[in-house]
Structure formats: C-alpha cells, structure tokens
Image (cartoon, rainbow, N blue to C red):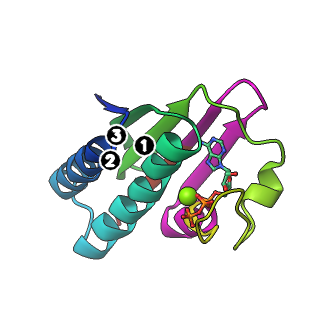
Amino acid sequence: MDEVPIQSGDDVVRVRQQVRIVAAQNGLSLVDQTKLVTAASELARNTLVHGGGGVARIEVVKSGNGRVGVKLQFSDEGPGIPDIDLALTDGWTTGSGLGLGLSGSRRLVDEFELNSKPGAGTSVVVVKWSR
Ligand SMILES: Nc1ncnc2c1ncn2[C@@H]1O[C@H](COP(=O)(O)OP(=O)(O)OP(=O)(O)O)[C@@H](O)[C@H]1O
Ligand SMILES: [Mg+2]
C-alpha cells in the first residue's frame, strides 16, 4: 500500500501519477486508468481545498471471483460534510468550483463510499475493478 500526503498542489499531481502507475500495473484498461486518475484528482483536490490537507492511500485488492482492483482512500481531519446527499448532488458547492467533483467521481468508479461527520473529518473510498 502506498501513502501519499496531500498538502499541496504538487502532492495532488503525485497522487495522480501514482494512481496511474498502480492502475496500469494491475491491468486496468487505458480508459479505466483515466477514469480512476480523474476521480483521484478530484478527490485529492477536495482533500486539499475543503479538508485542509490529508492523505491518499493506494492499494491493490482482489475480489472473490479473482478480479483485481485498485482501491483508493482519501482522508482528512477537516470540517467534514454536514449533508452528504447534498454534497453528492451535481452542481452543489460551498466554494467556487462547479460542484461536480464528488458526483463526477462517483460515476467514474465501480465502488464509492463517503463517510463524514461535521468536526470529524472526511473519508472517501473508491474501487475500480479490472474487467
Ligand atoms: N474533504 C472534504 N471536506 C469537507 N467538505 C468537502 C470535502 N469534499 C467535498 N466537500 C464539500 O462538498 C462540496 C461538493 O464537493 P465537489 O467536489 O462536488 O465540488 P467542489 O469541490 O465545490 O467543486 P469542484 O470539485 O467541481 O471544483 C464542496 O463544495 C464541499 O462543501
Ligand atoms: Mg471538488
């Protein structure tokens, strides 16, 4: 498992690069690599901008039927998200973005889990399976 700290824009670039490498090494198609890297980029940027920094964990996982996947976790100890359903709505933002980062990321991966509590930080776990 790789751990990449997210404290700067350069770190977001490092996360993207590392996700690309691990996805390519584990048999994700070029299209799926790009989908996962795009999701990672949005989630890493949220960790930095909204969460005040945190960490990305990159892990290779295996399913019961022998498929290989790449699992990513983004966690921070920032302010958290009061209303998760609202945060996952296309176009909803508390900042100056488009409000498409979370909702878009969810559509780009196979599994998506967002846990957050106001004052207790945020964790987003995603998985993309090889096919
Ligand atoms: N890690 C986080 N910590 C706290 N709040 C978050 C976090 N990630 C997302 N949010 C909240 O969820 C909202 C929606 O996130 P989303 O990524 O969809 O949009 P955005 O970051 O505002 O804009 P965009 O990603 O399109 O530039 C954010 O505006 C923010 O309020
Ligand atoms: Mg965002």
Q: Earlier in the sequence, mark 1 or mark 2?
A: 2
Q: Position of residue 22 (x, y in %)?
A: 22, 48
Q: Amino acid at mark 1?
A: Leu
Q: Dot 3: within a 10 Å radius of its alpha carbon, few (fewer than 14), some, or many (20 or more) residues?
A: some
Horizontal side of 79 relative to 127 (left or right) equals: right
Q: From the viewer's perspective, is 24 left or right of 128?
A: left
Question: What amino acid is labelled 2 in the image?
Answer: Gly
* Residue 130 in sight here: no
Ligand 1 quadrant in view: bottom right
Secondary structure found at label 3: loop
Alpha carbon of mark 3 to alpha carbon of mark 2: how far? 4 Å
Using the numbered discs, state the Cα–Cα distance from disc 3 to disc 1 in whole angstroms. Answer: 18 Å
Q: Nearer the viewer, mark 3 or mark 1?
A: 3
Numbered label attached to residue 72: 1
The tag on residue 9 is: 2
Q: Which residues are magenta?
A: 102-124
Disc 3 marks which residue? 8
Crowding around mark 1 (Cα neighbors within 10 Å: few <14, some 14 to 19, many 20+) is many
